[in-house]
Structure formats: C-alpha cells, structure tokens
C-alpha cells in the first residue's frame, strides 16, 4: 500500500524543484516547469495548469502536458472553468478523486478527449488570493492518487506561488527599469535638442540634428522630417538609408498621410502599403512600416517626423512604446524648430526691411540728387541750344537733349521700382495703378487692374508685401510668359486680402517650381509667409500662369519660442 507521507527522495526533489522555480525568471518557462515537476512528483500522465482571469471567476489560460497536438485539435476549444475544474475556482481547496465520473459536478468529456479517471487538483494561492490551479489525471499504473501525492502537489503549489510572485516582481522591476531607460533616452535626446536651441539657430542644422537623434532613438532604418510649404508638405531633412535622396521631395498636404497627421495633430503607425501617397513617390519604395509623429508647438502644426522600418523588428513595425518615445521627443524637437524658424524669419524680415530702407534711401538719392541734377543739365542745354548760332551745334545739343530725356524717363522708372512714392504717401491702390501703367507701356502688355481695398489702409508691411508680390509677378510675365494680356485683382474682405495675377502666356513648369522654386517663387512665398499669408503659383485653368495669394490685413505678431 502506498504511503500517505512524503518519503525522503521526494522531499529532496521538492526542495530542488523549489530552488529551480525561484531561480526561473521567465514566466512562460516557469509555467512549463511547474507542469513537468507535477508529473514527475506524482506520476501523473496528464497535467494541466489553469490561470484565472482578473475577476478570479474563469480560466483565462489553460496549459496542458501529456495531450498531443492531434488530440488537442480533436478536443477543440480549451476549457474555461466549468464542471470539476470550476470546483477548485469556487472552493480553492485540494480535491482528490478516485473516479472523476462519480463527482456531481462532472460534465463528462467532449468528443476526442482521452479517457481520464483518477484526479488530483490543488489551487495556487498568491498573497492570499487564488491565482490558478494545478490539475492532474491518470496516475501511473492505473491506481488512484494518494495522500503523499496530494501533499507533494500542495508543497509544489506553494513553491509555484512563491515563484510566480517572484517572477511578477522581477518582471515589474524590469518593466520599471525599461521605462526608466526609455525616459532616460528621451531625456538625453531632448537635452541634446534643448542644447541645440541654445547653441544653434540655423534651421537646416537643427533639422539635421532632429532626424539623426530621432532615428537613433527608435532604431529606424530611415527618418525624415517634412515641413508644410503652401499647399504641399516637403521633406526638409533626412537621415539613414537613402536619406540623401529624400530631401526636397514634396507631396500634396491634402492628399497625403503626413498631411493628415499634421492636420489632426496625432501620431500614426501605418503599413507603408497603406500610405495615401505611395512610398515609391517618396523615394522609399522598399519600406514596409512607418511611424508618423506631428511636431506641434503651442497648438500650431510645424511639420511631421517620419520613421521608416524598425531595424531590430522582423517585419519593420514600430511598437506603441516607440510611438510614445518619439512623441515625447517630438515635443522638444518642435520647440527647436519653432525657435530656429523664428530666428530665420526674423533674419529674413530684417533683411527685407533693410532692403526696403535701402531702396527708399536710393530712391531719395536718385530723385533729390541725380534726377534734379539731370533736370538742371537739361535746362542749361536747352538754353544753350536756343542761343547757339551754329545749326550743327544746335542739332547736336538737340540729340543730347533727346537722349537725356530718355535717360531721365528710365531713371524715373527705376526710382519708382525701387520705392514708389505713391506707396508711402497715397497707399497701395495708387502704387499698383502706377506700376501697372508703367509695365504696360514699357513691355507693350495689356494689363487689366482691379483693386478694392475699402477706405482704411492696410498695415504698411502687408502693403509692401502685396506690392512686391505683384511687381515680381509682372516681372515674370514680361520675362517668361510671352503673354499679351494680364489681369490683376486685389480685393479685401473682413479677414484678409486676396491677390490674383493671371496671364495668357505659355504657363509655368510646375515640376520646376516644386523642385527648384524657380521664377522667384521662393522669395514670393517667403514674403507672403512673413506677412502671415500663403501663396500658390500654377498653370491657369485656361492656360497661362496664375498667382494667388491670401494675406491678413495686418501681419502676425509671433511670440518667441520658450
């Protein structure tokens, strides 16, 4: 007859098993070891481990040992904790049966289930609460489980409880360590960006730093940053595989995933195949996965940071942790970009203001000194011509007077181009009227001008910006369009001013505009942007070229980045 007390060999084995459990920190390996030890210590042919759900009312997981894969497929769905299995959930006490079928809670077995008679079940209690149960059936030799088996399994369950709690604590510590590492990574990256804010104000250098640090942060194969340019979003900097060829690539804001992320202000993890603009159009045809994170500063979308293919991932996909990490990084990066942009805009605004001041100075100098001197010389020559008795001399003086008159006309035109007095003294409408008449007469171009600005004058900066936009557009028409007719409309509403310049010429090469910013479009966009507006230049619906700009009645007062 089998003894109901533990013999010395089994006690020694239990001690060894306990030590091995405590040393095992891999939760999945621990579960396998528990099943294996339970079979070894009791001689059970079948062993199962049921892990309870959070409410401790059902089985969330059910692991088995002894049932082969073919039998498992025949059984179908794993149990959830009803019948005999549910008894230990409702009453977490050891249960030993010589015949399963004799118990009132026995529901029998599903089709394909191997026959089982003897049964031994013991709960695993962690910190006073049921965590799961060990179930054993079919002891070797067809005999029932005895008291020693039950005692061994109880000790084993206690060891398992200690090991499960130990693994949980170690796993929690490891998770906290990993989280701390992620925080440290973000802190290191954001510190680098913060230093860049203080030490570097060149926008290109800041963008380069962001993509390099961001790529290292999430282990991306490639990373690039896209910034809005009018109605498009353009890759401004890139790092990693193929990064050198990405810069300058632009896609429509309204028809791209990057545009969607910028507009919504929320990150997205996408398969490359699901991008609204094909990855091949971006120069990353072999990409499989992308993580897109917006750069947002004070509620304003500045751009989008895009990571392509995680290097240490089999399928290249990024994790939620990567998304959270890059999102935190992007917050500091956005501050750096905003600072650099503000510095860049300030420098550009200062340069344009200086240029306008210099234009005013030269216009005054030419008008007050050179033009007046030429006018005086013309008067003296006219007097000399009238007094000269020599017809040959009089004729020569006449020719000089004609040439001098032509040069004075050109000089007046130059003075107007430098800084029309009407713009400062009378306002934008008279200045545009003078500009249109001058260009029309000089270039034999028919110009239709319509200006409706109301009674109040615009901010001087906005007036200057509009005048220069129209002036540059007319210069393009004369030089490049081969047009016979041009229509200019400048109209004001409650919130801003719309500017339109259309010609009937040969039209612009839109690809050239995107890639090179030709026809002075970069300068025009910069002027419009500094005034708080937008500008587009494209082929007209009926041919020719159409420039459209929208500017506020007063330029924005931008706050410096903190």
Image (cartoon, rainbow, N blue to C red):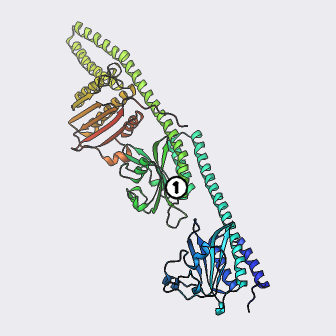
Q: Position of residue 189 (x, y in %)?
A: 59, 49
Is 430 located above or below residue 187 in the figure?
A: above
| Residue linked to disc 1 | 323
Residue 520 in sight here: no
Q: Quadrant of the C terminus?
A: top right
Which of the 4 quarters of the picture holds residue 58?
bottom right
Residue sitting nearer the eye, 515 or 180 = 180
Q: Quadrant of the N terminus?
A: bottom right
Which residue shows up at 34% across the image and 14% down it? 372
User: Mark 1: few, some, or many residues within 10 Å (few <14, many ≥20)?
Assistant: some
Q: Position of residue 500 (x, y in %)?
A: 28, 35
Which of the 4 quarters of the picture holds residue 529?
top left
Is 90 located above or below residue 549 in the figure?
A: below
Which residue shows up at 50% across the image and 33% down it? 559
> Is residue 177 shown left or right of residue 16?
left
Residue sitting nearer the eye, 332 or 384 = 332
Which of the 4 quarters of the picture holds residue 448?
top left
> Is residue 382 shown left or right of residue 70?
left
> Is residue 401 shown left or right of residue 286?
left
Is 339 located above or below residue 510 in the figure?
A: above
Is 362 located above or below residue 511 in the figure?
A: above
Residue 259 in sight here: yes
> Is residue 442 shown left or right of residue 497?
left
Q: Residue furthest front?
A: 104
Q: Label 1: state its secondary structure.
A: helix
Q: Residue furthest right?
A: 8
Q: Position of residue 366 (x, y in %)?
A: 37, 19
Residue sitting nearer the eye, 97 or 224 = 97
Q: Position of residue 11 (x, y in %)?
A: 77, 81
């Amino acid at each position: 007859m089998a003894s109901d007390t533990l013999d010395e060999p089994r006690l020694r084995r239990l001690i060894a098993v306990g030590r091995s459990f405590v040393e095992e920190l891999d939760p999945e390996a621990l579960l396998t070891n528990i099943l294996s030890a339970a079979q070894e210590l009791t001689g059970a042919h079948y062993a199962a481990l049921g892990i309870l759900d959070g409410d401790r009312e059902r089985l969330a997981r059910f692991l088995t040992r002894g049932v082969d894969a073919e039998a498992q497929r025949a059984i179908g769905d794993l149990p959830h904790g009803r019948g005999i299995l549910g008894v230990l959930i409702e009453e977490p006490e050891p249960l030993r049966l010589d015949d399963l079928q004799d118990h009132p809670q026995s529901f029998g077995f599903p089709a394909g289930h191997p026959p089982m008679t003897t049964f031994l079940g013991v709960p695993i209690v962690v910190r006073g609460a049921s965590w799961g149960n060990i179930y054993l059936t079919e002891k070797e030799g067809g005999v029932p489980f005895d008291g020693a088996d039950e005692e061994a399994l109880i000790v084993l369950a206690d060891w398992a409880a200690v090991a499960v709690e130990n693994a949980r604590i170690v796993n929690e510590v490891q998770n906290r360590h990993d989280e701390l590492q992620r925080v440290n990574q973000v802190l290191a990256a954001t510190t680098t960006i913060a230093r860049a804010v203080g030490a570097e104000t060149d926008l290109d250098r800041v963008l380069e730093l962001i993509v390099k640090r961001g790529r290292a942060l999430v282990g991306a194969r490639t990373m690039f940053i896209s910034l809005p340019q009018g109605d498009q979003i353009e890759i401004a900097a890139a790092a990693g595989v193929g990064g050198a060829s990405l810069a300058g690539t632009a896609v429509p804001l309204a028809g791209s995933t990057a545009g969607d992320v910028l507009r919504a202000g929320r990150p997205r993890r996408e398969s490359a195949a699901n991008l609204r603009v094909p990855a091949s159009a971006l120069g990353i045809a072999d990409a499989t996965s992308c993580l897109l994170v917006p750069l947002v500063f004070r509620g304003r979308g500045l751009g989008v940071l895009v990571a392509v293919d995680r290097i240490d991932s089999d399928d290249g996909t990024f994790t939620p942790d990567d998304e959270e990490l890059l999102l935190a990084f992007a917050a500091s990066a956005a501050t750096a970009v905003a600072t650099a942009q503000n510095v860049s805009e300030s420098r550009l605004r200062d340069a344009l203001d200086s240029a306008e001041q210099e234009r005013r100075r030269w216009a005054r100098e030419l008008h007050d000194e050179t033009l007046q001197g030429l006018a005086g010389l013309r008067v003296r020559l006219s007097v000399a011509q009238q007094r000269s008795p020599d017809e040959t001399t009089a004729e020569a003086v006449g020719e000089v007077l004609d040439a001098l008159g032509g040069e004075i006309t050109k000089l007046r035109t130059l003075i107007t181009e430098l800084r029309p007095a009407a713009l400062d003294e009378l306002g934008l409408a008279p200045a545009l009227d003078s500009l249109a008449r001058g260009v029309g007469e000089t270039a034999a171009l028919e110009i239709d001008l319509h200006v409706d600005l109301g009674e109040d004058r615009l901010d001087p900066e906005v007036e200057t910006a509009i005048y220069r936009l129209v002036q540059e557009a007319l210069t393009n028409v004369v030089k490049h369009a081969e047009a016979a007719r041009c229509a200019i409309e400048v109209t004001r509403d409650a919130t801003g001013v719309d500017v339109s310049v259309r010609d009937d010429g040969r039209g612009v090469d839109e690809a050239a505009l995107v890639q090179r910013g030709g026809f002075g479009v970069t300068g025009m966009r910069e002027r419009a942007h500094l005034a708080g507006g937008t500008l587009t230049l494209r082929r007209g619906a009926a041919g020719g070229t159409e420039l459209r700009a929208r500017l506020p009645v007063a330029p924005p007062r931008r706050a410096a980045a903190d």
